[in-house]
Amino acid sequence: QVQLVESGGGLVQPGGSLRLSCAAPGSIRSINSMGWYRQAPGKQRELVATITSGGSINYGDSVKGRFTISRDNAKNTVYLQMNSLKPEDTAIYYCNTGVIRDYSGRYYSGNWGQGTQVTVSS
């Protein structure tokens, strides 16, 4: 399974913005879906957003209208633009993918990043 590499977390004031990035390392032929999940202390992990290779997007209700997910297939990277941030958005954000296919005929599933902390506070 592939360890995804995340970046972009940090501390931001309410109403501010952050942009998260997540890249799958190595030589990759395709990634069927990519997405973001988050988990706050004492709470279960929840869906933030997903995007398929065909461009189909799904957002969690709590972020709809404020967050935007996108992907750059040439860079094997998924982004999460977070606007109008609220204290309730404070969590560790985890990147996830569906099946990754390399050029040697191998497939990798259940791929996660290490998590990046997002803190929204004044």
Image: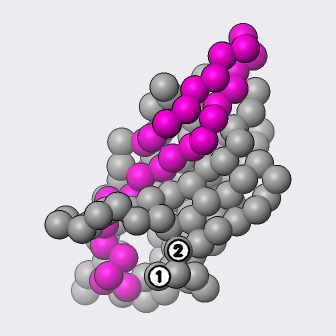
The residue positioned 41% from the left and 52% from the top of the image is 94
Disc 1 designates what residue? 62
Snapshot quadrant of residue 32: top right
What colour-coding does the image apply? one colour
Q: Residues within 10 Å of mark 1 (few under 14, many from 20)?
A: few
Gap in angstroms between the C-alphas marked 1 and 2: 6 Å
Residue 83 visible in the displayed image: no
The residue positioned 45% from the left and 41% from the top of the image is 112
The disc labelled 1 sits on which kind of residue? Ser
Q: Quadrant of the C terminus?
A: bottom left
Residue 71, above or below 43: above
Q: Residues within 10 Å of mark 2 (few under 14, many from 20)?
A: some
- Residue 57: image x %, image y %? 70, 65
Question: Which circle marks residue 14 in the picture?
Answer: none
The disc labelled 2 sits on which kind of residue? Gly
- Was residue 112 drawn as part of the magenta stretch in this picture? yes
Evaluate if marks 1 and 2 touch, with contact meaning CB atoms under 8 Å apart: yes
- Residue 6: image x %, image y %? 46, 46
Disc 2 designates what residue? 60
